[in-house]
Image: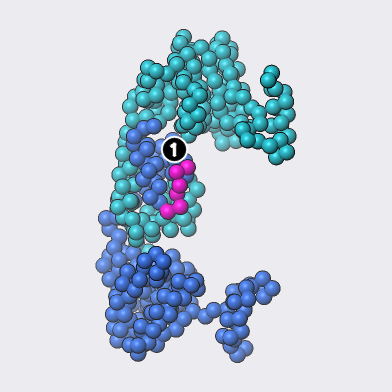
Chain colours: A cyan, B blue
Amino acid sequence: MSKSLEFLTESLRRLPGVGPKSAQRMAFHLLQHDREGAAQLSRALYQAVDTVHHCAMCNTFSDTEVCDLCVDEARDRALLCVVETPADQLMIEQTLTYRGLYFVLMGRLSPLDGIGPKDLHLDKLVNRAADGVVQEVVLATNFTNEGEATAHYISEMLKARGLKVSRLARGVPVGGELEYVDAGTIARAMIDRRSA
Amino acid sequence: MSKSLEFLTESLRRLPGVGPKSAQRMAFHLLQHDREGAAQLSRALYQAVDTVHHCAMCNTFSDTEVCDLCVDEARDRALLCVVETPADQLMIEQTLTYRGLYFVLMGRLSPLDGIGPKDLHLDKLVNRAADGVVQEVVLATNFTNEGEATAHYISEMLKARGLKVSRLARGVPVGGELEYVDAGTIARAMIDRRSA
C-alpha cells in the first residue's frame, strides 16, 4: 500500500472510537471522493492545535486568553457552575435557565484512570471560586459514580472555605413514566420531594 | 465556542460516519489529550492529498506512477483480478492464493448513486486487459447486487474482446453450517457443485 496512505490510516486511528477498518474506510473516502475535505481537515487541525488554549478564567477551550462567555458583562458573576466538559456547558446554555459563569473541569476524578485532584487542576477552581465575587457554586458534574465523587470532593473543598455550594436536582426526567424509571431514581425523587 | 474549535468540529464531519456528537467528542479529545496526534493527522492528510495518485496500471492508490505490486516481476502478468476497492485487494492478498496482478475499480456500478460505466473508467480496464499479455481476468467484485451487476457488465465487455473471464466461486463459507446459511447461498452451492 502507498506509504502516504498507510501514514494517513495510522494517523486517523488517533481519533477516539476509530479502529483499523474505519480508519481505512475514512482514508479511502477522503482520497477518492473528498480531497478538498481532507485538505480542509488538515488546515482545521493545524489551526486548532496552534490557537486553541484554555480560558484563564473558566478553563474551557478558547482562542483568546479569556473566553467570550467569561468577558460577557451581562452574565451574573455571583454564580459559578462547575461542569465536566465543554459539551456539558453547551447543554446547560441551551436550556436558557442559567445566566451565571462556568468552570469547566475538562474531566472528572477517576482514580482507576489515574486522574486525581491535581490532574484536574482543582486549585485553579478554588482560586476562581474564592475571588470574593462568586456567591454560589452550582455543581453540574454528571450523575455517574465518577461525576458524583467529583462533585462530593469539590463540595467539601469549597465548603471548607465558607462558600455556598449547590448541586443540580436529581429526580424523574421530564416525560418520565414511573413504570419505566429505575428504582434508584425514584428513591432519590422520593427523598428530595418538594411541596407542590 | 472557540472559532478554531468550531471549524475543527465542522471539518471532522467530512469524515464518513461522523455526526455532530462524534465530531465534537473527537475535537475535544484531540485538543485535551492528544495534540501531538492532531498535528500528526494534519500532516498525514496534507501529505496524502499531495502525494497519493492512482496507479497508471491498476488504478489503486499509489505514491508512485506505477504501484509496487504492478512493478513486481515475481507476479504472474497473465492474470488480472478485478476488485472494487483497495481493501478488497488487501483481503485477497492476505489469502496468499493469488499471484497475478490487479485492477482496482475504486467503486462499483450504481445507477441509483449516478455511477455508470464512464464514472468507473471501465475503458481504462479494457485497455489494461487487452494488452496482449493478460490471459484471464478474474472478477472479484462483491457478491452484492451492485457488485454482481458490475461483474456481469465487465464480463460482457471483455468477452466481446475475446478475453477469458472468470468469477470467484460462490458457495457455503468455510465453517458454515447448512442450517444457518441462507437458502440462496445453498442453492448456488448446489448448482455449482463440483466432483469430490
Residue found farthest to the front: A196
Q: Which residue is tagged 1?
A: B28
> Is residue B115 one of those drawn in magenta?
no
- Image spot of residue A71 (x, y percent): 36, 20
Q: Nearer the viewer, residue A84 or A183?
A: A183
Magenta residues, as a range? B16-21
Residue A190 seen in render: yes
Point out the image quarter for the C terminus of chain A: top right
Q: On screen, B130 above or below A1?
A: below
What residue lies at 32% left-to-right and 69% top-to-bottom?
B119
Q: Nearer the viewer, residue B80 or B75?
A: B80
In the picture provided, is A63 more to the left or to the right than B32?
A: left
Mark 1 chain: B
- What secondary structure predominates along the stretch shown in magenta? loop
Q: Count numbered badges in the picture.
A: 1
- Image spot of residue A73 (x, y percent): 37, 17
Residue A182 seen in render: no
Q: On screen, A36 above or below B191?
A: above
Point out the image quarter for the N terminus of chain A: bottom left
Q: On screen, B77 above or below A28?
A: below
In the picture provided, is B89 more to the left or to the right than B59?
A: right
What residue lies at 73% left-to-right and 34% top-to-bottom?
A183
What residue lies at 48% left-to-right and 34% top-to-bottom?
A87
In the picture provided, is A184 more to the left or to the right than A53?
A: right
In the picture provided, is A97 more to the left or to the right than A33?
A: right
What residue lies at 61% left-to-right and 33% top-to-bottom?
A174
Q: On screen, B122 above or below A43?
A: below
Q: Quadrant of residue B80?
A: bottom left
Q: Which residue type carries mark 1?
A: Phe
SS state under label 1 = helix
Q: Nearer the viewer, residue B152 or B129?
A: B152
Q: Quadrant of residue B81?
A: bottom left
